[in-house]
Image (spheres, rainbow, N blue to C red):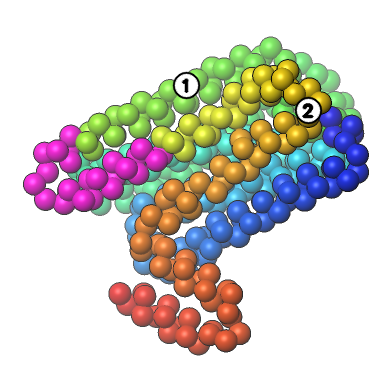
């Protein structure tokens, strides 16, 4: 980022904007997490389990992204071992997002097209197994990057310091080949899953004589997953976008880099509650209650407790 070139005032404002957006988005996402864990009614629904995992993953990914951004200004040279751990978790959470979207699309496909098999195929136990396998699968590419460093560099490199971002540490041809192969495979599988589930749900909606509303909502949800995936892929074309705009506006290098960083790493973390959470009336009424309670906690704490009990009974 060449943060050392930024005057103190510019660096302070950029970090203030980044941290401020991170706190706001984390607060909004946190309301959905609280609503989930405080209401057992969601514990047995696969759809909500996968959704809240996506939100928690976004919170972790946003925290790591903002932390790395601030560290690039506050600690320009970071120990390689610490940097490796941060990048390991950042890469893992980034890989989790498309896999989680694919899992959510499959769950909606089974719910609409194979409703009799849904309780068995999408049980709570199998959902948590899927999430565990997702984390295992997503961690393999990140670990591979570190292993490539170990193969190509002496072990002493982990006692040195570098500017902590992915291209600085993982900069060999092997890393490039790994990224191209793995990301192409991951994204191809996810896109095929989204296309398959969308058209099968579309067929089911046309053939259905009843419950067309559920099929329509499922189809729209899968479309929104596609939009979410497109925005996730924005990070892959960010270098090209930077190259184009930096050529047009060389005097605004720092502003261009900050803008593309926010659009590719920070703002998309707000999509999960906006695209999915606020569309779900069952989840949203709990979130609305907690937002209201947090604003007027001292005055209406008893009313919120009573409202929570009535919502749970319903």
Q: Indicate the quadrant where residue 205 lies.
A: top left
| Residue at 47%, 66% in the rendered image | 287
Q: Quadrant of the N terminus?
A: top right
In this rendering, would 201 be left or right of 209? right
- Pinpoint residue 142: horizontal percent, then vertical percent: 63, 30
Which tag, 2 or 1, sits closer to the chain's start? 1
Residue identifier under label 1 = 185
**Location of residue 201 (image quadrant):** top left
- The quarter of the picture where residue 167 lies is top right
Query: What number of labels is visible?
Result: 2
At which x and y percent is residue 264?
61, 35
Give the residue displayed 40% in from the left and 27% down from the top: 191
The range drawn in magenta is: 203-225
Image point 67% across, 56% down: which residue? 23
Q: Which residue is mark 2?
A: 253
Towards the viewer: 207 or 309: 207
Label 2, label 1: how far apart the Cα atoms are: 33 Å
Q: In the rendered image, which quarter contains the C terminus?
A: bottom left
The numbered mark at residue 277 is none
Q: Disc 2 vs disc 1: which is toward the camera?
A: 2
- Residue 124: image location, x then y, percent: 36, 54
- Is 208 situated left or right of 287 in this image? left
Q: Position of residue 203 (x, y in %)?
A: 18, 34
Q: Is residue 91 left or right of residue 198?
A: right
Between residue 280 and residue 164, name the one nearer to us: 280
Is residue 140 something one can see in this rendering? no
- Does residue 20 sit above or below 314 in this rendering? above
Name which residue lies at 37% across and 57% down.
280
Q: Main secondary structure of the magenta part?
A: helix
| Residue 123, above or below 96 | below
């Amino acid at each position: 980022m060449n943060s050392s070139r930024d005057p103190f005032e510019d660096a302070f404002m950029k970090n203030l904007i980044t941290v401020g957006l991170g706190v706001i988005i984390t607060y909004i996402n946190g309301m959905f997490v609280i609503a989930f864990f405080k209401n057992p009614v969601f514990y047995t629904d696969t759809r909500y389990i996968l959704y809240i995992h996506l939100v928690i993953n976004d919170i972790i990914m946003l925290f790591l992204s903002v932390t790395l951004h601030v560290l690039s200004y506050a600690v320009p040279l970071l120990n390689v071992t610490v940097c490796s751990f941060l990048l390991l978790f950042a890469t893992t959470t980034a890989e989790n997002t498309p896999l989680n979207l694919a899992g959510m699309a499959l769950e909606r496909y089974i719910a609409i097209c194979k409703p009799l098999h849904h309780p068995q195929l999408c049980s709570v136990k199998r959902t948590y197994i899927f999430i565990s396998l997702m984390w295992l699968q997503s961690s393999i590419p990140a670990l591979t990057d570190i292993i490539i460093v170990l193969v190509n560099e002496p072990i002493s490199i982990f006692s040195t310091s570098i500017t902590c971002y992915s291209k600085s540490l993982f900069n060999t041809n092997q890393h490039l080949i790994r990224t191209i192969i793995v990301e192409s495979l991951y994204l191809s599988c996810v896109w095929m899953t989204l296309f398959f589930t969308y058209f099968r749900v579309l067929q089911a909606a046309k053939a259905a004589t009843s419950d067309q509303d559920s099929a329509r909502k499922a189809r729209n949800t899968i479309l929104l997953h596609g939009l979410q995936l497109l925005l996730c892929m924005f990070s892959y074309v960010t270098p090209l976008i930077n190259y184009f705009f930096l050529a047009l506006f060389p005097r605004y290098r720092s502003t261009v880099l900050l803008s593309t960083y926010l659009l590719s790493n920070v703002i998309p973390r707000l999509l999960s509650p906006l695209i999915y959470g606020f569309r779900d009336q069952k989840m949203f009424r709990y979130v609305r209650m907690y937002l209201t309670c947090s604003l007027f906690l001292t005055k209406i704490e008893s009313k919120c407790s009573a409202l929570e009990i009535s919502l749970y009974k319903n």
